[in-house]
Image (spheres, rainbow, N blue to C red):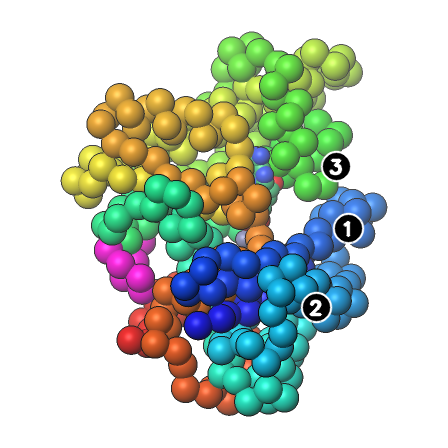
Amino acid sequence: MLILGIETSCDETGVALYDTAAGLLGESLHSQVDLHALYGGVVPELASRDHIRRLVPLTREALAKSSRGLDDLDLIAFTQGPGLAGALLVGASVAAGLGIALGKPVTGIHHLEGHLLSPLLADPRPDFPFVALLVSGGHTQLMRVDGVGRYRLLGETVDDAAGEAFDKTASLLGLGYPGGPALSKLAEQGRADRFDFPRPKAKSGDLDFSFSGLKTAVLTKVRQLGTLDASTRADLAASFQAAAVDVLVAKCLQAMTSEGLDRLVVAGGVGANARLRAQLVGAAARQGAQVYFPPVHLCTDNGAMIAFAAALKFPGGLPEETGFPVHPRWDLAQAASRQGS
Ligand code: KG4
Ligand code: ZN
């Protein structure tokens, strides 16, 4: 079964073809970073317009890379939510249009389910059950995953998402948008032990997170310091990153212990962070556990995770669906219960 996956929930236009027999065939991606950088964050209207411009050429490109044509498709999958309503509608409209024109079924996929299942694209692939850390710009959640569509929320952030904290702290340090990758790059040159930032909720006993206090601690320190030289900025970045990563690692270990599981899967944009990867692998190994990541380029938003999630959810294909509602706010538990055989 050949599946076209379309992702347009935020600021990346992603298209990919996944074949249930041959695996991932071709991927195309356009990041809108340059478009939004000027404004210091994503401008929804500009995002929608750019998705309109990019989606059809990227679909052609992904098909060409895969040496496949539109007629070869068996299923079209698109991100149905959560995300920016206008941006989601672009992917939904193109998917629905293709479905009608080709007479092929179309299905909507939950963005977080795409992230959650993407580590299964890696080799080695984790067996169920596992604990999943979903750590992106909009979400920070720990889940217990017993199978495709069988997810239980263990804990989540009570305020900012981890990626949001990276982005806001980066902006404080004058790194622009999107801050996460730039901050982690700057942190490589800094001393993580120079500033002792708080590790919020690290010892709270529950599996929830809180990142807004950490962000405020950096803001307070920046104000206290006044002008920042290059090495101080790097030390601030490194010390912030160390605090954020420490909390994420502590909660992941705690989640595995409380669930009696020894497999951890990390998904979402912050999963690309090198320190998080290294610390998790080390800490998990000391606990006799193993950590699985998607390939780095599949940590951030992409079409492959959407096509792949559709392949796992609907292994027997899908009857034709009509209409294409999007869900800008969408609970994963609701989405997970929809599944084929
Ligand atoms: O999953 P994603 O592409 O989009 C959402 O669904 O949110 O995640 C984007 C988030 C942004 O906050 C970005 O700054 C963060 O992931 N991010 C990183 C790194 N790469 C991306 N944060 C820390 N270190 C990185 N290397
Ligand atoms: Zn995402």
Disc 1 is placed on an element classified as helix
Ligand 1 quarter of the rendering: top right
| 12 to 56, vertically: above or below | above
Front one among 34 and 173: 34
Q: Position of residue 88 (x, y in %)?
A: 61, 69
Q: Position of residue 76 (x, y in %)?
A: 53, 75
Q: Is residue 41 left or right of residue 187?
A: right
Q: Quadrant of residue 255?
A: top left
Task: Quickly name the residue at label 2.
Answer: 60
Instruction: Tell me if I can see residue 57 in this picture.
Output: yes
Magenta residues: mostly which secondary structure? Answer: strand
Q: Closer to the N terminus: mark 1 or mark 2?
A: 1
Q: Quadrant of residue 44?
A: bottom right
Task: Quickly name the residue at label 1.
Answer: 36
* Real-space CA distance between mark 3 and mark 1, rounded to the nearest whole angstrom: 10 Å
Q: Which residues are magenta?
A: 146-155
Disc 2 is placed on an element classified as helix
Q: Residues within 10 Å of mark 1 (few under 14, many from 20)?
A: some
Front one among 23 and 28: 23
Residue 271 in magenta stretch = no
* Real-space CA distance between mark 1 and mark 2, rounded to the nearest whole angstrom: 25 Å
| 320 to 280, vertically: above or below | below
Q: Quadrant of residue 333?
A: bottom left
Task: Quickly name the residue at label 3.
Answer: 176
